Image (cartoon, rainbow, N blue to C red):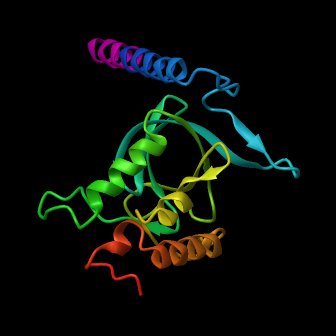
Amino acid sequence: MYRKRVVFTTVVILGALLVCSMGARLFVRVGEPPPTVALNAQTETTDGTSSLVEAAVVKVIDGDTIEVLIDGRVHRVRYIGIDAPETVHSYRPAQTFGVEAAARNEELVGGRTVLLEKDISETDRYGRLLRYVWLDDILINEALVRDGYAQSFTYPPDVKYQDRLDRAEKEARAAGRGLWRTEEFPNS
C-alpha cells in the first residue's frame, strides 16, 4: 500500500512538473498555437495504420538519444540513421564534439512535444526505442546531421530516410560544419 502511494505521488508530481514546463514554454513562444493533439495520440496514414506517436521529451541524454513520456511511461529513444559523438560513459571522457551535439539536441527538442516515427525495428540491443524524431515538419535526425552534430550511419533494416541523411552529411562535410571542422573528423 505504501509503495503504491509513493508511486502515485511521484507520478502526480512528475506530471505537474511536466505540465508546468510545457506551459512555460508555450508562454515564452507567444503567437504560436498550443499543441492540439493529446499526449498519446497517434496520427494515421491514408491506409489507416498509425505512423507517428506524439511524445513529450523529458530528458536529452546526448546528441542522438532522448527520454520521452508516452502514455504515462518514460521510454529511452535512440535516433535512427545517425551517430553523434558520445558523452555518457563512466569509463571514458566525452568524445570530440559530443558535448556540443548534446547541447544542440537539447536546444532542438528539450522539453518539447515531438512525433516519433518507427521504421522496421522496434528497439535496439539496449532496449531503446528506435525512431525518427519530428518537430513540426523538421526531421530532427536530419537537422543534427546537416548542422554537423552527428554523422549519417546506416543501421539496416531501418533505412527509410537514409538517402536524406546521407545528403545532409555531404552538405555538412562540404561546408565544414560542426564536427567536420575538427581534426578528428576531417571533411573529406
Which residue is outermost to the front?
A: 175
Where does the image place residue 165, in percent across and percent down from the top left?
57, 70
Where does the image place residue 125, in percent across and percent down from the top left?
40, 65
Q: Residue at coordinates 23% horizontally, 66% vertically from top-left?
A: 95
- Quarter in which the C terminus is drawn: bottom left
11 is within the stretch colored magenta: yes
Q: Is residue 97 above or below residue 135?
A: below
Residue 93 appears in the picture as rendered:
yes
Q: Is residue 2 left or right of residue 76?
A: left
Q: Which residues are magenta?
A: 1-12
Q: Is residue 112 above or below residue 91?
A: above
Residue 122 appears in the picture as rendered:
no
Task: Name which quarter of the figure residue 17 lies in.
Answer: top left
Where does the image place residue 34, in percent across and percent down from the top left?
64, 22
Where does the image place residue 71, in percent across and percent down from the top left?
55, 31
Secondary structure of the magenta portion, mostly?
helix
- Quarter in which the N terminus is drawn: top left
